[in-house]
Amino acid sequence: MKTILLLTASNIFMTLAWYGHLKFKFLEGKSLFFVILTAWGIAFFEYCLMVPANRAGYLTGTFTGYQLKIIQEAITLGIFAIFAWLVLKEKLTWNYAVSFALILGAVYFATAFKPAASGGH
C-alpha cells in the first residue's frame, strides 16, 4: 500500500510538471526556458516520491520492475484523467475510457499471476 500511495503522490507532481504549465497563469508570457525550469522544480518532488516508491515496492519483493512500471502507468492515466477534466476542461470520451480500461486490464494481468522464479526479481 505504501508503494501505491507514493506512486500516486509522485504522479500528481509529474502531471503538474508535464501539463500544468499549459494552464498556470503565472507562466503566461514567460520564456520557454523559465517554463522548463519551473517544470523541473515541480518534477523534483515527483522524484522524491517516485524513487522511494519503486525501492519500497521492489526491494521488499512486493513487485517486480515490470509490475511497478505497469502500475505507475495506470496511476498516471488516472491522475491525468482527473487533471484533464478539472484543469484542462476536457471530457473523457468513450475511446479514452476504453483505452484506460485496457490499461487497467494490463495491471490485472501484470499483478494477478506470480512471475516464474528467476535469478533475481
Image (spheres, rainbow, N blue to C red):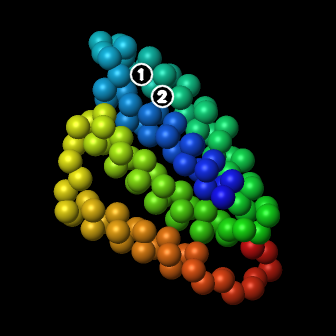
- Mark 1 near mark 2, Cβ–Cβ under 8 Å? yes
Tag of residue 88: none
Mark 2, residue position: 39
Q: What residue type is labelled 1?
A: Val
Image quarter hosting the N terminus: bottom right
Image quadrant where residue 44 sits: top right
Q: Which residue is drawn at 46% across and 60% down?
A: 74
Residue 29, percent from left and from top: 29, 12
Instruction: Look at the numbered disc 1 and give the secondary structure of its residue.
Output: helix
Tag of residue 35: 1
Image quarter hosting the C terminus: bottom right
101 left or right of 72 in image: left
Q: Residue at x 35, y 68 (%)?
A: 101
The front one of 79 and 15 is: 79
Q: What residue type is labelled 2?
A: Ala
Residue 17, percent from left and from top: 46, 33
User: Does residue 46 lie above or below 93 as drawn?
Assistant: above
